[in-house]
Image (tube, grey):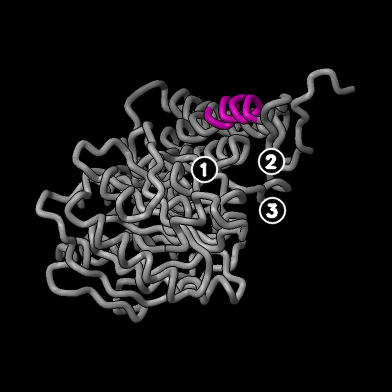
């Protein structure tokens, strides 16, 4: 009963391990989870506590927690992330193990995570997937989560953020209290689990993974998890947290492909076997260039905003690029591109004048007009995107653009 006496203050030794369980109407399984958590603390050979972060249960979960020797923490703000944050903040241990209270995780094996803490790791992820040595018992996970959702989201996490784990969204995980402070987690819902792993990677924390077994949940009521809805929330969050993959990469691909096609088709038709690419394809190629440019601009906007709001860490390479693109340079570049488009229009007008303002060959005329219109659109986009970037560059006492010295919150400081 070390966990119980530790939090009651009847002993002076500090708490080493806190096992935190978010709880919302888990009366059917909570007692068993607490019992296994006590066993896990005993196996670890440390002084520990069990914290139940109750997020508004209407059953007798609170009474069960008290009878089981756990400390109950009421978290009024609804949401999975809020419940976890409240439990972590209330925990007094230097090592924290997190897991759901539905019976799907065996807390008696907490020593596996604690061993990694002793080796110096700051985030320890459980892995349910066979690819990482884990095991999923029959009936423990719906097929769409097992074969589609979790593998796909984990692959995206590895690709986008270079995260060294196989199971990005495993509910059994551990972190140090110091690591939690470094992460500065912001989200309140299911995205909290993704943000924890992403921020750990950004902060270059030492991350380890241990294989675990996922058991069927012991409750009779439906799960709080909604696979399609919550899967989309995790995917959306990862995309928003990665402007490079959401905006920059698609923008560069669109712009490059469109530019190659546009240059070629501005000169003449292209024949690919029986297929002839003409001015219709030229139009779509120029549209791709415009879309691509806008996505690249969005990538810069999103990156600057995320860094200034503390959602993404400072990026020295991006800061150097950011300093090069000033408002004045953007305006000049935009005017030059706009001028290039105007020149093409003037040339088209001259050709029309020479022809006596009569009807011109359709394809040849469009080959002069479409590139000119595209350059003018890009010029206007460049100018106003530069003005918007100028707004994002503004430095105040509350926000810092990339590469700027940290602002002071003391308004009286000189």
Kindly check if marks 1 and 3 are in contact, taking CB atoms under 8 A apart as contact: no
Asked whether 31 or 323 is in front, the reply is: 31
Marking on residue 402: 2
Q: Residue 252: x, y in percent?
A: 49, 51
Using the numbered discs, state the Cα–Cα distance from disc 3 to disc 2 in whole angstroms: 10 Å
- The residue at which mark 3 appears reads as 317
Q: Residue 59: x, y in percent?
A: 19, 40
Q: Main secondary structure of the magenta part?
A: helix
Q: Secondary structure at mark 2?
A: loop
Kindly check if marks 2 and 1 are in contact, taking CB atoms under 8 A apart as contact: no
Using the numbered discs, state the Cα–Cα distance from disc 1 to disc 3 in whole angstroms: 15 Å
Residue at image position (37%, 49%) is 52
Q: Residue 130: x, y in percent?
A: 29, 79
Q: Which residues are magenta?
A: 381-392
| 272 w.r.t. 213: above or below | above
Q: Is residue 36 visible?
A: yes
Which of the marked residues, 2 or 1, is nearer the chain's N terminus? Answer: 1
Give the crowd class for mark 2: few <14, some 14-19, many >=20 residues within 10 Å: many
Callout in the foreground (2, 1): 2
* Left or right, 145 with reference to 68: left
Residue at image position (14%, 55%) is 219
* Left or right, 29 with reference to 381: left
Q: Residue 315: x, y in percent?
A: 66, 51
- Residue 19 found in image quarter: bottom left
């Amino acid at each position: 009963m070390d966990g119980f006496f530790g939090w009651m203050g009847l002993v002076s030794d500090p708490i080493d391990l806190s096992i935190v369980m978010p709880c919302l109407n888990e009366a059917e399984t909570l007692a068993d989870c607490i019992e296994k958590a006590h066993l896990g603390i005993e196996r670890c050979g440390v002084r520990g506590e069990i914290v139940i972060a109750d997020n508004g249960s209407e059953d007798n979960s609170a009474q069960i927690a008290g009878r089981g020797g756990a400390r109950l923490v009421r978290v009024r703000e609804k949401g999975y992330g809020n419940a976890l944050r409240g439990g972590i903040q209330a925990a007094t241990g230097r090592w924290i193990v997190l897991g759901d209270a539905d019976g799907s995780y065996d807390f008696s094996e907490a020593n596996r995570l604690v061993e990694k803490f002793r080796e110096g790791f700051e985030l320890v992820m459980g892995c349910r997937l066979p690819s990482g040595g884990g095991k999923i018992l029959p009936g423990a996970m719906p097929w769409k989560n097992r074969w589609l959702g979790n593998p796909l989201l984990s692959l995206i996490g590895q690709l986008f953020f270079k995260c060294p784990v196989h199971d990005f969204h495993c509910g059994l995980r551990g972190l140090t209290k110091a690591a939690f402070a470094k992460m500065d987690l912001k989200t309140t819902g299911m995205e909290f689990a993704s943000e924890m792993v992403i921020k750990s990677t950004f902060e270059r924390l030492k991350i380890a993974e241990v294989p675990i077994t996922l058991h069927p949940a012991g409750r009779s009521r439906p799960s709080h998890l909604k696979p399609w809805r919550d899967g989309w929330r995790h995917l959306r969050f990862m995309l928003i947290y990665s402007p490079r993959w959401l905006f920059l990469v698609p923008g560069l691909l669109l712009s490059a492909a469109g530019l190659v096609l546009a240059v070629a088709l501005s000169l003449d038709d292209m024949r690919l076997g029986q297929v002839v690419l003409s001015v219709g394809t030229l139009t779509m190629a120029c549209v791709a260039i415009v879309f691509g440019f806008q996505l690249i601009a969005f990538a810069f906007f999103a990156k600057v905003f995320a860094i200034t709001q503390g959602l993404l860490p400072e990026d020295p390479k991006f800061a150097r690029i950011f300093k090069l693109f000033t408002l004045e340079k953007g305006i000049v570049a935009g005017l030059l591109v706009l001028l290039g488009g105007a020149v093409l229009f003037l040339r088209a007008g001259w050709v029309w004048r020479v022809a006596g303002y009569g009807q011109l060959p359709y394809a040849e005329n469009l080959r002069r007009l479409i590139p000119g219109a595209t350059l003018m659109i890009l010029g206007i986009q460049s100018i106003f995107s530069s003005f918007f970037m100028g707004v994002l560059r503004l430095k105040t006492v509350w926000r810092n653009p990339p590469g700027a010295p940290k602002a002071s919150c003391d308004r009286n400081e000189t």
